[in-house]
Amino acid sequence: MSSGLFALLDDVVLIAKTAAASADDIAAAAAKASAKSLGVVVDDAAVTPKYVVGFPAARELPIIKSIAWGSLKNKLLFILPAALILSQFAPWAITPLLILGGLFLCFEGAEKVLEMLTHKDGDGTSAKTKTEQQTIAGAIRTDFILSAEIMTLALSTVNGEAFTTQALTLLVVAFFVTFLVYGAVAIIVKADDFGLHLLSRNPDGALGGLGRGIIKTMPYFLTTLSFVGTLAMLWVGGGILIHAAEHYNWHMPEELMHAVQHTVAGDYPLSGLVQWLGGAAFAGVVGLISGACIVPIVSIFHRGH
């Protein structure tokens, strides 16, 4: 009787250890996947605040909430099932999809660089000329593309793992990335209101000074965030293309990137960071060149339609 009880307890402990190990594996895979898609996440966070421009302050958070809910539905109802089906029945399609996503990121980044250089607004339609529902629908459509890229990148990190590990990893990434992006966006778009609140409560004190600083800093912060998002798109897009070329046995781009990293390597503080920046810069240049080749093709297509 007692030996049977101890055997049962041993089984329970083994199951618990297995579950804990699986949870650790999933958490590690989700963290790796989220880190790999960081550039797209930054771009998502950089793009979204523009959708609430022109709307009353009271509608900003409801609009962001609606976009976040649409983003989560995109990931859970459409992208996640499609990604799992691909992983099981057409794993060979993951790399071509990554290439398409990488080219899209390169195109978006190059187009934004062109807009910066020519001082043009790529959209040309302000939020004031759109209804709230039109704005939300447009934001969710844009998010679908970015979310698909995030989930495909996440899938590529667990490709070959057990189906359950893949599914749970993508599920964790879907919730984590959505919370991260739209939580950050909510904080960003309400920062001005928070600054005004501090300023109104204590105009001449330290809190008032902090509020005044937030109000003055936010336009520069948003500009910087947009710039970082553009760099991130080019870096991630170029990196995807470089690694995809390696996957198809074209080694030169990867070798050139390693050569750049080797050139800046040395025995000095932050050498590892500088090497990483060198590789990221090379990937960004590849992304910019690739995107710049696509921009005129897309422009011709738009003129034709």
Image (cartoon, rainbow, N blue to C red):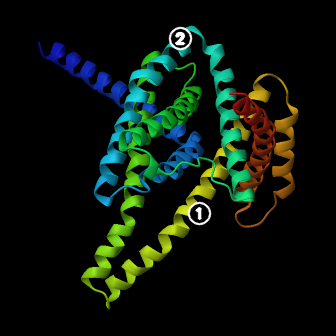
User: Observer-nearest residue: 166 or 212?
Assistant: 212
Q: Which quadrant holds the C terminus?
A: top right
- Label 1 crowd (10 A; few <14 / some 14-19 / many >=20): few
Q: Label for residue 216?
A: none
Horizontal and vertical percent position of residue 239: 72, 39
Number of labels in the image equals 2
Q: Residue at x 53, y 66 (%)?
A: 221
Residue 242 position by quadrant: top right
User: Observer-nearest residue: 75 or 215?
Assistant: 215
Q: Residue at x 43, y 29 (%)?
A: 75
Horizontal and vertical percent position of residue 4: 17, 13
Q: Residue furthest left?
A: 1
Q: Which quadrant holds the N terminus?
A: top left
Secondary element at image label 2? helix
Amino acid identity at mark 2: Gln
Q: Do the residues labelled 1 and 2 touch (CB within 8 Å)?
A: no
Q: Which residue lies furthest to the bottom in this view?
A: 204
Amino acid identity at mark 1: Thr
- Label 2 crowd (10 A; few <14 / some 14-19 / many >=20): few
The numbered mark, 1 or 2, whose residue comes first in the sequence reads: 2
Tell me: 10 left or right of 32: left
Q: Name the residue under label 2.
A: 88
Secondary element at image label 1? helix
Tell me: 177 left or right of 245: left
Horizontal and vertical percent position of residue 277: 72, 55
Q: Can the viewer see residue 24 in this picture?
A: no
User: Observer-nearest residue: 17 or 115?
Assistant: 115
Name the mark nearer the viewer: 1 or 2.
1
Q: Name the residue under label 1.
A: 224
Establish if 148 lies above or below 258: above
Q: Residue at x 45, y 48 (%)?
A: 129
Horizontal and vertical percent position of residue 125: 54, 48
